[in-house]
Amino acid sequence: MSDCQLACPANPSEQFLRSERIPHIWCPGCGIGTTVNCFTRALLESKVDRSKLVVVSGIGCTGRVAGYVDLDSFHTTHGRAIPFATGLKMANPKLNVVVYSGDGDLFAIGGNHLIHAARRNVDLKVICVNNMIYAMTGGQTAPTTPDDVTTSTAPFGTYDPAFNLPYLVEAAGACYVARWTTYHVRQLAISMKEMFSKKGFSFIEILSPCPTLYQRRNKMGDGLDAMKFYKDHSKIKHGCPTSEVALSKSGEIVLGKFVDRERPDYQEMMNHHLQEELGSRYVEMKEEALCS
Amino acid sequence: MPADPRGVLTGSHFLDGDHAACEGALAAGARFAAGYPITPSTEVVERYASRAPLVGGTFIQLEDELAASIAIQGAAWAGAKAFTVTSGPGFSLMMEHIGLAAMTETPCVFINVQRGGPSTGLPTLPAQADMMQVKWGSHGDYYVIAVCPSSPQECFDLTIKAFNLSEKYRVPVFVMLDEVVGHMTEKVVIPPADQIEVEPRHFTAKKPGEYKPFEADALGIPEMVKAGDGYNIHITGLTHDDRGYPNMSPPMQDKLVKRLRSKIIDNAEKIWMYEEQDIAGAEVVVVCYGITARVAQRAIDMAKEKGVKVGKFRLITAWPFPDKPIRELAARVKAFVVPELNLGQMVQEVERAVAGKAKTVLVPHAGGSVHRPEDILKAIMEVAR
């Protein structure tokens, strides 16, 4: 045990982390670690049964979150965290399944899976770290990259229109939609905690800086400058129509909880429907159906 | 262990191959299936969708084959025996997750009812054109098991076998039907549950903290746990160490990928299944599989009537390829005839095994129908001369 560990009380977040895997791969100024810290705070406060909590990630910088949390965790293929998570949840409804991935993973290559899981209202908690770029591969244009910035694949500037993630996810059927930045750590942790109390498809977008590949290439400064930018440009508008929360390069960032509604989740609908149709012949999938 | 009787439809049935494969999956204990409709395989999941709610299972129709082929892996890690079903174009989309299942050693079963390709090809007509794709279609070196039923009864029997092998070797296993076998209707006998042997999942007895998800036993196969059991496992498609943690060093790559190979190749003799007929004294041996084995039987019978000493070697396991028995045959027969509903796929493995010790003749067919027995007979007669 090092002197530091003797002298300092343990960080309460540490119990949720695979400390033996530190240092992590994220760059200085990156916001992903901040989101993980908020996630562990939310776990501490929400008192979810951690043995039933599973984190599923796709591929990319945020995809590495699954590898650092000391929980059952799956680092799957690019864009496919949601269908993997759907299989987990459908086979064992007692699992509390979190999908933790990036904007490119969830909305480009995985976009089809995301809208269908939201349509079905599968009981998944989806955390999307949006750094507006493909970071792991070196800063290429993503479906979230705003207009008029430079990326490695848009050397003369972007002209692809970007997705407005909350608007898309709400339209697809999500029960809970919120957006924060890595500057708004307390609000983010509260939002994550609230998400753990929801049933159905929940979605939190977190704006997070990529100083190495987005800020620097666009002369936007470092991680600290990104925090100042988030602080100065953010406006909290709970309940704001998601059609009005699109992001741009330097415009207002609308934050808050935009959608919080109830509708039966996929498994409730399935069980209810099959019960009605089949009566006593219906055998709901229970843990006995799993290998033991 | 014996099968769970809830999934076993004991009795004598008149079923097509697709339906029989579904019953095989249910008998093997499959309680989760995910699929996307595609001809000529859809009947498998249609039947599963009607049967699963009665036996405590779940079916979900997903948005595409990419989703279906990974949802079954999520279900497998939740503890379910799980499978998906597809045909050519869908199988192409599933390649990504064949690699994932091989790399993460996830037990699961893929049923592929083969049709003519490439691309959309012949949606309703047969081929055996994915035999190399199943082995080589996903990137990287990987080793899987593939079986080839040639009757609805075998669709039932071999689907059970596929689940058992997937549990035993922690590997994705493929049941490679073709459209004719999938759609032909024959008698299928389903035995009582206590007469069906089902391989249990090999869960560890170790405690959290002691268990490593990729620490191999003497056969090269690691024990499993499931999500929610408190082991805090990490499973990744990246090259990983015994703990499952990413480790992208050349020595770790070497160790892992070689073990993924050796757990199949070193156990190949235990995995191989094949049927030999009139091999002793044969001058010509017809190597065949799936529906083509049944067409070849007619050609073999015709050749025998003409006095040719001809035997049959029917591949039941295509992968790992039973090269040793073919190599042994090559030392004493004159020639091999290999009819396939493709332009020459498994014949390459036959040639590899034969290694020039005997003549090997392909009887190709681009697909869309089965061979004419006369075409196979012609090849037998030519090499027998």
Image: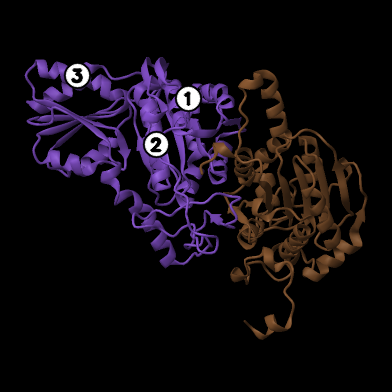
Chain colours: A brown, B purple
Tag 2: amino acid? Ala
Q: Answer above or below: position of A121 versus A65.
A: above
Q: Secondary structure at mark 1?
A: loop
Provide the residue designation for mark 2: B162
Q: Residues within 10 Å of mark 2 (few under 14, many from 20)?
A: many
Residue B312: percent from left, percent from top: 18, 28
Considering the numbered disc 3 on the image, is that residue within a helix, a strand or a loop?
Answer: helix
Residue A154 is situated, as x and y percent measured from the top left of the image, at 69, 54
In-image side of A109 versus B372 (left or right): right
Q: What is the x, y in percent for residue B182?
A: 41, 22
Q: Residue visible at 53% across and 62% down? A: B246
Q: CA distance from mark 2 to mark 1?
A: 17 Å
Q: Type of residue at label 1?
A: Ser
Q: Is residue B8 left or right of residue B374?
A: right
From the image, tell me which residue sits under label 1: B41
Residue occupying the point 63% across, 30% down: A284
What chain letter is assigned to the residue under label 1?
Answer: B
Which corner quadrant holds the C terminus of chain B?
top left
The answer to whether residue B7 is seen in the rendering is yes
Label pair 2/1, CB-CB below 8 angstroms: no
Name the image quarter holding residue A220: bottom right
Q: Residue furthest bottom?
A: A3
Residue marked by disc 3: B299
Find the distance from the CA under tag 3 to the CA under tag 2.
30 Å
